[in-house]
Amino acid sequence: MYRGLWKLINRVVNKENVLSAYLGTAIVGWTAVVTCVGLGLCSALGMAFPEALPNSICAGLYAGIVFGLIGSILYLQRNPSEMK
């Protein structure tokens, strides 16, 4: 997933801005996906929307930080040839 996103961002964005665009896209992507999955799961379990929304947003923000930011940084550290 990280490699595919890196290749896509490299095709679309200038070389000077590719790193910041990659990290930002990964963070926002993970946050949005986990928030939507959380809302769907809470809806399937029968929770009320006002009760489910803060929990889903919190889970999405943590996923964006952990999997989006930290995961992307670890991917780039393990694959330094990708940054050229």
Image: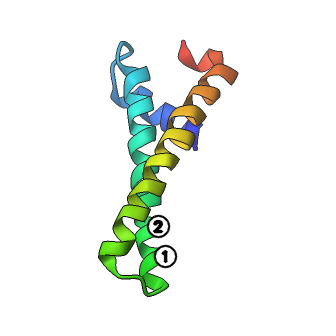
Q: Nearer the viewer, residue 48 or 73?
A: 48
Task: Look at the image and tell me in which quarter the C terminus lies.
Answer: top right
In the rendered image, residue 62, in percent from the top left (x then y), is placed at 50, 47
Q: Which residue is mark 1?
A: 41
56 relative to 80 in the view: left or right: left
Give the Cα separation between the discs numbered 1 and 2.
Answer: 6 Å
Task: Look at the image and tell me in which quarter the N terminus lies.
Answer: top right
Which residue shows up at 54% across the image and 16% down it? 83
In the rendered image, residue 61, in percent from the top left (x then y), is placed at 43, 48
Where residue 81 sits, quadrant-wise, is top right
40 lies above or below 20: below
For this orientation, the residue located farthest to the front is 51
Colour pattern: rainbow
Which residue shows up at 36% across the image and 12% down it? 16
Q: Nearer the viewer, residue 44 or 81?
A: 44
Q: Secondary structure at mark 2?
A: helix
Which residue shows up at 56% across the image and 42% down it? 67
Q: Nearer the viewer, residue 53 or 14?
A: 53
For this orientation, the residue located farthest to the right is 78
Q: Which residue is mark 2?
A: 37
Marking on residue 72: none
In the rendered image, residue 14, in percent from the top left (x then y), is placed at 33, 19
In the rendered image, residue 12, in percent from the top left (x then y), is placed at 34, 30
Q: Nearer the viewer, residue 26 or 35?
A: 35
Q: Say if mark 1 contacts mark 2, CB within 8 Å.
A: yes
Q: Secondary structure at mark 1?
A: helix
Residue type, numbered disc 1: Leu
Residue type, numbered disc 2: Val
